[in-house]
Amino acid sequence: MTAQAVPTPPATGPATVELRQVSRWYGNVVAVNDVTMTIGPGVTGLLGPNGAGKSTLLNMMAGFLAPSGGTLSLNGRPVWRNHDIYRLIGLVPEREAVYGFLTGWQFVLSSAKLHRLPDPVEAARRALATVEMEAAKDRRIETYSKGMRQRVKVAAAMVHDPQVLLLDEPFNGMDPRQRLHLMDLVKAMGAAGKTIVFSSHILEEVERVAGHIEVMVAGRHAASGDFREIRRRMTDRPHLFKVRSSDDRRLAAALIADASAGAVSLAGTGLEVQAVDFRRFTWLLPRVARDAGVRVWEVSPADEDLESVFSYLITRST
């Protein structure tokens, strides 16, 4: 019998996933439409409402689904029909891709053996410890809670220490302590140079974990970047600021006289100002305050958060 060759371990270092005009359709249904993006080391949040194409995109990144059009590569190498790429990628699907009759230990150990790791037992032990599942490792998976099943799926996906980890709605079903632990783990792996992509439709998860955001709406790539950067690029929508000063009424009158402030209203704790022209407003405010003899104590954006960005993008894209 001829011995099977053991694959050469993958090269270490940063990993970059590139999508160029990627589309995927099922008959007449377009799930992903002409998406171009580059994802590098760190934590990237794939944000979008249910049905936006997030799961389809992750499955194409993992090489489990062929693009109907466009190209998708990892470090310049094609992902589709490239079995060697699986040594570099770990995927945690949203659906329950586990065997209930196996124990958590058997499930993770099987993944380690399939990757032909030199010490599968130690790799499985380390992965289960990382997700804090040692105490329940000898129980059958069918007895696990939803959050426990999520964690054992993460352990199986990271058992071979992949450069790229793809997580589809990973925090679903977890209790608050489990969610915080996995969030911290994801952030730590991203800080260590791993390329982490996780999908979510929950704003708080993305805002808390991701350093970079890719927004999907109705199968299209709607925006990219830090959510504050995305917000600042929205020049076609007024920016809302809260302003506190020594004389709010006098400052309001001075701002209304300039066209860069579309609306000014007195609130209980200061002014609310809609800036039609963001650049002019940031230039104008200190000068107007100085000329009016008013001291400005605080200026803060009232709508530069992920919720306002997301709501606006959905409204604009649908």
Image (spheres, rainbow, N blue to C red):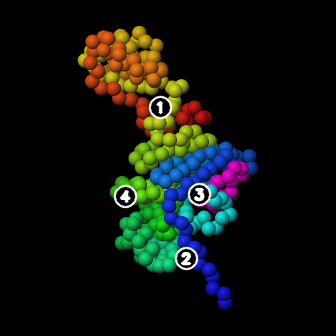
Q: Measure how far apart labels 1 and 2 are at the Cα level.
A: 48 Å
> What residue is shown with label 1?
232
Query: Can residue 191 be seen here?
Result: yes
**170 up-or-down from 257: above or below:** below
Q: Measure how far apart labels 3 and 1 are at the Cα level.
A: 31 Å
Q: Amino acid at mark 1?
A: Arg
Q: Mark 4 and 1 residues: CB-CB less than 8 Å, in contact?
A: no
SS at circle 3: loop
Crowding at dot 1, Cα within 10 Å, few <14 / some 14-19 / many 20+, comes out as few
SS at circle 4: helix
Q: Which residues are magenta?
A: 62-75
Q: Which residue sits at x=46%, y=13%?
A: 259
Question: Mark 4 or mark 2, which is nearer the start of the sequence?
Answer: 2
Q: In front here: 186 or 72?
A: 72
SS at circle 1: helix
SS at circle 2: loop
Q: Measure how far apart labels 4 and 1 are at the Cα level.
A: 32 Å
